[in-house]
Image (tube, helix red, strand yellow):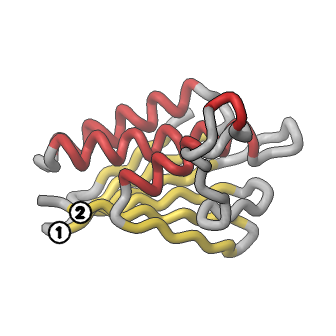
Amino acid sequence: MVLVSDEARSLHIAIGRDMADVGRANRSLEEFLESRAVDAQATFAATVVLEEILTNILKYAYEDGGPHEVRIGAEIDARELVLQIADDGRPFDILAAPAPDFDRPVECRDAGGLGIHLVRALAQRVEYRRAGGRNVVTVHFSLK
């Protein structure tokens, strides 16, 4: 389920563990950014990053089959778009994950890590903290 709260400069979304919510959350973010005339490059980067982070959370963060909630916030001002994604899954510091070794042939690389690399490449800055039993990832994008 996607719950959306839309203020003039911010958007708040909560989703459960249904993978279909990833697409709905992404469409909500895209509509919010387009309605505020955020440029196409920043909108593309933000939606790709949100999809990657949410997909990873839903696939890997939870060890049980119980209900969980992922909270997504987006705030914009004249210079910056800030996404914040918070989940109650097992601790995972996105910044501590090693970068893929692109010097090795594809067939010799460890699986995974490309999505996190993509997040880092598309964002101006990525921050991580663990607070109140939640992983909190904050992603900054420059606006033109």
Which disc is residue 79 wearing? 1
Residue situated in front as seen by the camera: 38 or 121: 121
Distance Cα–Cα, label 2 vs label 1: 6 Å
Report helix, strand or loop for mark 2: strand
Disc 2 or 1, which lies upstream in sequence? 1
Mark 2 surroundings within 10 Å by alpha-carbon count, few (fewer than 14), some (14 through 19), many (20 or more) = some
Q: Is residue 100 above or below residue 130?
A: above
Q: Which amino acid type corresponds to the residue marked 2 in the rendered image?
A: Ser
Which residue lies at the image location 30% right of the left edge and 60% below the top edge? 141
- Which residue is drawn at the image coordinates 32% and 45% (left, top)? 45
What amino acid is at disc 1?
Answer: Arg
User: Residue drawn 66% across and 59% down?
Assistant: 97
Measured as percent of width and height from the top left, residue 20 is found at 56, 24
Q: Nearer the viewer, residue 108 or 136?
A: 108
Q: Is residue 78 above or below residue 7?
A: below
Seen in the image, is 37 located left or right of residue 136?
left
Left or right side of 71 for 87? right
Quadrant assignment for the N terminus:
top right
**Does the CB distance between marks 2 and 1 fall below 8 Å?**
yes
The residue beneath circle 2 is: 142
